[in-house]
Image (tube, rainbow, N blue to C red):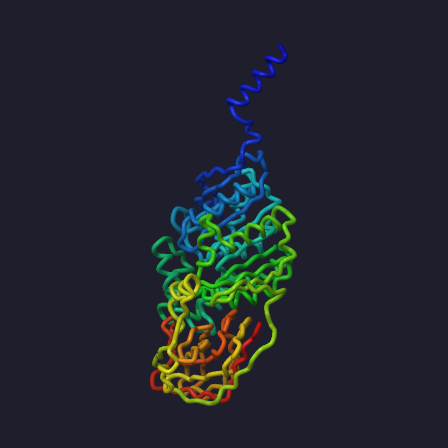
Amino acid sequence: MRRSLVLVLVLLTTLLGAPAAIAAPGHQISYKSISGVGGTTLKAFVVEPTGVGSGPFPLLVMPSSWAVPNIEYVGAAAKLAKESGYVVVSYTSRGFWDSGGEIDIAGPDTVGDVSKVIDWAVANAHADGTKVGVAGISYGAGQSLLAAATDKRIKAAAALSTWTDLARSLYPNNTVNKQAVEVLLAAGHATGRPGPVLQEAEDAYRDGRFWEVVPISAGRSAASKIEQINANGTAVMIGNAWNDGIFAPGQVADFYSKLTGPKRLMLSPGDHATAELFGAAGLPNEIWESVGRWFDRHVKGTANGIDAEQPVQLKPNNGGTWKKFGAWPAGNADTMQLDGKKIHAGWGTVADSGTILLSGALQGFLNIPTGVALPFVDRNLAGVWSGPQYPNGVTLAGTPKLKLTVTPSAETTTLFAYLYEVGPLGLGALVTHKPVKVTGAGRTQTLDVQLEPTVWNVGAGNRLALVIDTVDPRYLTESTRGSTVIFGPSSLTVPKA
């Protein structure tokens, strides 16, 4: 009789399958309404692990990018839930798409929503409030860093295509990044409901008063909250692109250098959000692979070896394998002496920085750089300086620095500095650039200008060339036609790996 009972139990187990407790790990997705700051409804996809018990599970919160709905991270979230056992909440940022409220440009309510989502997940989605990470792309990345400064429950953050200083991003050296501002405004109007802060900022921009927007930057920039992030001990990973046309990498590199907790920086070819784009959909992606390992170590506490790796990982902008450093590179450098020149301002040349989103994407995906034919740069309208050949090539790594002596004849002039790699025929590829606004008619002054950082492999037999002109279609130019600019003896210092 006992043997018969055992046989029946074995047969039932075979027919009905394994008990739920040992079911294969998987995930389930649900669409939820979450109450944010002030009761504003935030619409979210909640991805929970299945087949791994009843929790509580480590939690990842992912606010959506500017003008992008909550579907953005579902692919990555499903992978993280199934393979690593996270509860992931991917939600639409307030003011956009299906969420309520108005766009406040990462203001206190938007940042506070991150904490409200954490509260909800702990209460309703079997999330562990002692094991919390935040991640996002672009607008979601900025929110993640800001929330890490205010919410001590956040153990780790992964910020991709992020800003750390809003003013430096959109108003570099007092020059409006016109293309970026127009793209952000258009997307905000098309997919969301601009609040008073955004409306006032747009009015100031349209009226030529962009400097009035600058005061909102500090409260919306992680760079101004570095002390809180360091005090919290938050583990911060940042992944950006060299050619990001909205949030250029210089502000990110400076922010990274000031972090004192666990940190990781990955810069690679591409434009805004392109390097990590496919990873958000759950497809293979080296940036998102690092994000997963970062959270496994600093949220789950898994000893996976990421601590022993070099934290600064830089992939050359024009192709090649990752170069790894213990800190931001500051090694040997070459200095190019620049002789004096006089140019006429207010007219463009064939030298420019390209088009945001497009030019950087071409560089990242196809290794097609923004080019120039150096012989066709009008020397009446631009200063042109060429350096010596590198017979064996060289790798640039770090931040090129320009010490520029200049005398403008107009009260306001905008200068655009472009660094190119140039071949024997004078065809150049844009390595990096930077605008700078100069004021003071007739006043000779020396400017210290940091170009955007880069890692770039200069080919054997090629040389570097610097071009400075006074008009660029990416930016709002304040140069006066008919005025002049006199360059005195100056220098360019270029760091090498």
Locate the C terminus by quadrant.
bottom right
Locate the N terminus by quadrant.
top right
Instruction: Give the residue displayed 54% in from the left and 47% down from the top.
Output: 60
**Residue 327 in the image: above or below residue 11:** below
Q: In terms of depth relative to the viewer, which is nearer, 182 or 272? A: 272
Instruction: Give the residue displayed 44% in from the left and 61% down from the top.
Output: 272
Task: Count the labels in the image.
Answer: 0
Instruction: Give the residue displayed 39% in from the left and 56% down from the top.
Output: 194
Drawn side of residue 478 relative to residue 228, left or right = left
Quadrant in the rendering for residue 473 = bottom left
Image x and y of residue 16, in percent:
51, 23
Drawn side of residue 433 relative to residue 149, left or right = left
Instruction: Give the residue displayed 34% in from the left and 83% down from the top.
Output: 481
Image x and y of residue 371, in percent:
39, 73
**Residue 254 in the image: above or below residue 481:** above
Image x and y of residue 434, in percent:
46, 74
Q: In terms of depth relative to the viewer, which is nearer, 337 or 473? A: 337
Quadrant in the rendering for residue 467 = bottom left
Drawn side of residue 141 relative to residue 132, left or right = left
Image x and y of residue 349, in percent:
35, 79
Q: In terms of depth relative to the viewer, which is nearer, 256 or 216? A: 256
**Residue 397 in the image: above or below residue 124:** below
